[in-house]
Image (tube, grey):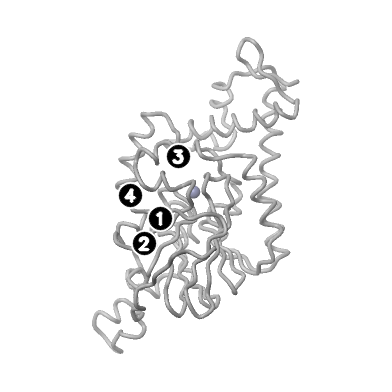
Amino acid sequence: MAAALAPRPRRQGVQDVTPRGGGAGAYRRAMNDAIPTMRFGPVTVHFGEKNGKYPDGNQLVVRGAEATAIFDTPQVAGRIPQVLAEADLALLGHVHEDHMAGLHLVPGLPLHVHEADAAAVRSWEGMARHYGYDEAVLAALRRKIEVQFHYRPRPDAIAYVDGQVWDLGGGVRVRALHLPGHTAGHSALIVEPEDLAFIGDIDLSGFGPYYGDASSDLAAFRRSLARLTELPLRVWVTSHHKGVVTGRAKFLALLQAYAACLDERSERLLQRLQDGPRTLAELVQQRLLYPPEAEELWIDSAERRTITLHLAELHEAGRVFLQEDGRWARA
Ligand SMILES: [Zn+2]
């Protein structure tokens, strides 16, 4: 279904209005030149620091004949103000602090987000439920993301649904494809007719899938990864790490390696129980995802959520059970 999109009159891009020679125009070009970009038809990818490694991300801009959309606003957005100024609407692939870092620069820009992530973007209370971390962690995290990511809620955010289409004019359309797991509302944004998909935090990284928040879901993540293999696309763009992937065989190999992390984690958890039953707290302390030296506010909470999801899946498969003493054991 098509979104009720009423594009504002198209403003001219900086290339059209920048005077040749020195002055502020030259400065803007120099700022822009410092950021690696790639073009695919109507889509420009502006790469964040280290190919968009967290805490940065990659900024996509899609220009139709009548409207320009930006996908997410990672930290790099702050370095391309002339690009943000061109935008008629912002589409969030999902809600997390690093994907909202430039929203404070475009406070009046119509902001669209999947309905399952809408509460998270609209208020801190919604964001806190979305993360689902311990109270003390949430308080510290809020202070941190207000400074590092200019976090502020957007109560005016507009909810979109799976299959929604934004027609940007000139045959350029964006279609939302709900791919939950990382968050409840995580969606790919597919640009037609370019067959390019912005797949956000299905980031194809060596770390593997992240589903450590309250709104994350392991079973949904598995289904979303399977769904991605079925789509006839040509270009895939992640928020972090891999950046741009072209070529179906390469994409499928990366996706397979990424998906394999899920079963590897289950196997590692079973190995931990090989030496005897463990409480959830003991398993969290041992860590399944993060190396022992990693220090982030949310690690214990994310480990607890992740391990709980794997234990539930293993329990369903009859491979583990919860003893009466509250310890998990192999079946
Ligand atoms: Zn994320």
Q: Earlier in the sequence, mark 3 or mark 4?
A: 3
Classed neighbour count for the residue bearing mark 1: other residues with Cα under 10 Å, few (<14), some (14–19), many (≥20): some
C-alpha distance separating marks 3 and 4:
15 Å
Residue 184 pos. (x, y %): 53, 44
C-alpha distance separating marks 2 and 3:
22 Å
- Residue at 59% of width from left, 29% of height from top? 308
Classed neighbour count for the residue bearing mark 3: other residues with Cα under 10 Å, few (<14), some (14–19), many (≥20): many
- Residue 110 is labelled as 2
- Residue 131 is labelled as none
- Residue 155 is labelled as 4
C-alpha distance separating marks 1 and 3:
17 Å
C-alpha distance separating marks 1 and 4:
9 Å
Say whether marks 1 and 4 touch (CB < 8 Å).
no
Q: Which residue is mark 1?
A: 158
Q: Which residue is mark 3?
A: 130
| Mark whose residue sits in front, 1 or 3 | 1
Above or below — where is 140 with respect to 78?
Answer: above
Please name the amino acid that badge 2 sits on.
Answer: Pro
Say whether marks 2 and 1 touch (CB < 8 Å).
yes
Q: Earlier in the sequence, mark 1 or mark 3?
A: 3
Instruction: Find the residue positioned furthest to the top.
Output: 325
Residue 243 pos. (x, y %): 55, 62
Dot 1 lies on which element?
strand
Above or below — where is 134 with respect to 197?
Answer: above
Q: Earlier in the sequence, mark 2 or mark 4?
A: 2
Please name the amino acid that badge 3 sits on.
Answer: His
